[in-house]
Amino acid sequence: MSDPQTPQDPSGQQPPAPQQPPVAPPPPAAPQPPAAPQYGAPAAPGAPQYGQPYAPAPAQKTPILSILSLIGGIVGIIGAFFYFGGLFAIAAVILGFIGRNKERQAKGFWLTGIILGFVAIALEIIVIIVLVIVIAAASSLSYSSY
């Protein structure tokens, strides 16, 4: 006897079972890139990778005292011939010594300011001494006629 649930062919044979669709083979795995060779120590975590730009360096503090010392020394030497350079020269020396203590990285500025300041002070003293001698010599001349 046959099962009432299965359809039968009038010839008495059973129909072929429905075919399953063929299962596709799994796709090939994606090729893995080769691992980077381990030469020496590993890269630092913050280091940029190949092709990435470096981060800008942190801004440094401007050595303002040392720059003012240098400018004061230059103005002091020029002003020594016009009788006002002594003030700038004294300021250059003072700012140079303060800059030496606070701004070590700007050695060229504060050292030049100190040297120019002392040279301007010496030049101012020499100019004043020459001026006093010229005035004394001029006042000793007499304009009397015989």
Image (cartoon, grey):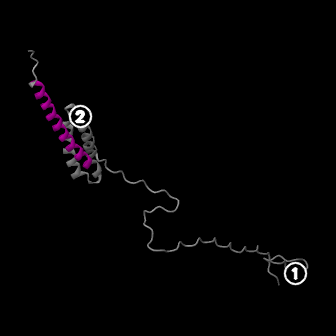
Give above or below for 33 relative to 134: below
For the residues carrying marks 1 and 2, which lies nearer the camera in this image?
Answer: 2
- Position of residue 99 measured from the top left corner of the image (x, y, whole percent): 23, 49
Q: Which residue is mark 2?
A: 79
The residue positioned 15% from the left and 31% from the top of the image is 131
The image quadrant of residue 124 is top left
Crowding around mark 1 (Cα neighbors within 10 Å: few <14, some 14 to 19, many 20+) is few
- Label 2, secondary structure: give it: helix
* Marks 1,2: beta carbons within 8 A: no
User: Would residue 117 be found to the left or right of residue 59 on screen?
Assistant: left
> Label 2 amino acid?
Gly
Q: What's drawn in magenta, residue-wise?
A: 110-139
Total marks drawn? 2
Q: Is residue 146 above or below residue 66?
A: above
Instruction: Give the camera-side residue of 14 and 65.
Output: 65
Determine the residue located farthest toward the top in the rendered image.
146
Q: Secondary structure at mark 1?
A: loop
Give the residue drawn at x 43%, y 55%.
Answer: 55
Badge number at residue 132:
none
**In-front residue for pair 7/98:** 98
Q: Amino acid at mark 1?
A: Gln
Say the numbered circle drawn on residue 13.
1
Whether residue 114 appears in magenta in the rendering, the answer is yes
Label 1, label 2: how far apart the Cα atoms are: 126 Å
Residue 120 locus on image (x, y percent): 21, 40
